[in-house]
Image: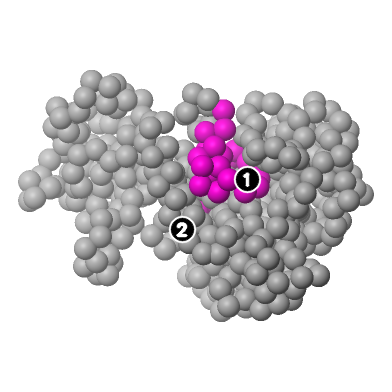
Amino acid sequence: MAAFPLPRWLAQRLGGPSDPAWCRTALATEPSLEGSLQALSRQLRGVGTADLALVFVSATYASDLPRLLPLLRERFRARHWIGCLGGGVVGTPAGRESRELEQEPGVSLTLLHLPGAILTPFAIENGPLPDLDGPAEPWLSLLGEPDPATDASMLLLIDPGFPAINDLISGLDYACPTAVKVGGIAGQHSARHGSLLFDDRVCSGAVGCLIGGAWGLDPVVAQGCRPIGPVFEVEQAQRNVVLEVSQNNRRNSPVAALQEILTGLSAEERDLVKHSLFLGVGRNSFSLEGRNSGEPPAFLVRNLIGVDPRNGAVAVAERMRIGQQVQFQLRDATASRQELRQLLRRQHSREPEPLAALLFACLGRGQGLYGEPDGDVSLCRECFGDLPVGGAFCNGEIGPIAGSTQLHGYTASWGFVVPRQGATSA
């Protein structure tokens, strides 16, 4: 398979004509691990030494996971190896378009050569985390003590058995506040080992890589919902239960507010409410800058997990606070396509061009959402042509909303591998 080159001017600036940046990808779908390894070898024949190898594996190979990295390292050369098992995989086979594999065997391999990049891989074991109210140094030590002032991005993969996922994400934001973080929660399986791949072993906990220097990740987070009704303000809340909301100084219970919204919806939309209703929780509701910006609030879409018919309260999969802005949301294929297409077009308008893309998609997307395969990657092809894509279907997606990293559901979290402005040659 031919390499995916950068434009000549950019390759010369970053690596010189004798050492251009490149991305090589392969996707194997054989039912046996040995067959998939042979397929990967055929697709990547003659590939050089990569700086970073990213491996995404479907649950079909769960029992073979401890053998995978040693066998891959015998066939391909890379300085660092990172990956995970997923509920499905995303990959780009030799000479073909990127694909999303669900409920079928798949091994996706992405090899990146990034001249001028500063790569800091890390593995965090299960165990007590540093204090979120303490100094940042213990958190930085988990990452190999990188310079917190470095303008780096972070690829982050977490085992589904990690006991404090939200605390880990918050702690990494605390330690590296300027680092964009993209990734997901790995897939579950019945084997006794973890779901993460690092260097030459399988592990649990969390793994990832800080990508700095001449390269980084541009995030795109598509939550797949569209708002219905007005923006409300929370007037009464207890933990994750919203008791009362207001709009234009008019107070109501959340259920009563929703009933008023339903009267203005179409029959099709009212049917969607029965199984695809969510709540958008404003992320910039409390900052003076956010309130005075004149821009609509950025919403984090969360599940509605219960209704109290006695008082019209709703329970949300998020801790709620008085004064927070909220808006009901509907999720469907049309809304997901429109939102992702708009976000990808915006990313495509930016300079410079990406070398590759990483996609971490919810298990609830794919054919279950779109009714056809390759729903997310086909939209990427509309904007970026044959840009190689690798990734996995996850049990939760990691990406930034309104300046902080969040754990999402039903979301497509993208990371575009891009050269940084002002980068110098390696």
Residue at 48 percent of width and 61 percent of height: 350
User: In the picture shown, does residue 164 fall above or below 253?
Assistant: below
Residue 399 within the segment the image draws in magenta: yes
Q: Which region is colored magenta? A: 373-400
Camera-side residue: 59 or 27? 27
Q: Look at mark 1 in the image and give the residue it sits on.
A: 386
Q: Which of the 4 image quarters holds residue 86? A: top right
The 10 Å Cα crowd at callout 1, few under 14, some 14 to 19, many 20 or more, is some
Instruction: Say whether residue 131 is left or right of residue 290.
Output: right
Instruction: Say whether residue 171 is left or right of residue 105.
Output: left
x and y percent of residue 17 in the render?
A: 77, 70
Q: Check disc 1 and report its element: helix, strand or loop.
A: loop
Residue at 19 percent of width and 51 percent of height: 233
Q: Is residue 211 visible?
A: no
Instruction: Say whether residue 253 is left or right of residue 111.
Output: left
How far apart are the two marked residues, 2 and 1, measured between alpha carbons? 16 Å
Camera-side residue: 420 or 277? 420
Looking at the rendered structure, the kind of residue marked 1 is: Asp
Residue at 36 percent of width and 36 percent of height: 335
On residue 349, the disc is 2
User: In the picture shown, does residue 128 fall above or below 238?
Assistant: below
x and y percent of residue 201 in the render?
A: 82, 50
Quadrant location of the N terminus in the rendered image: top right
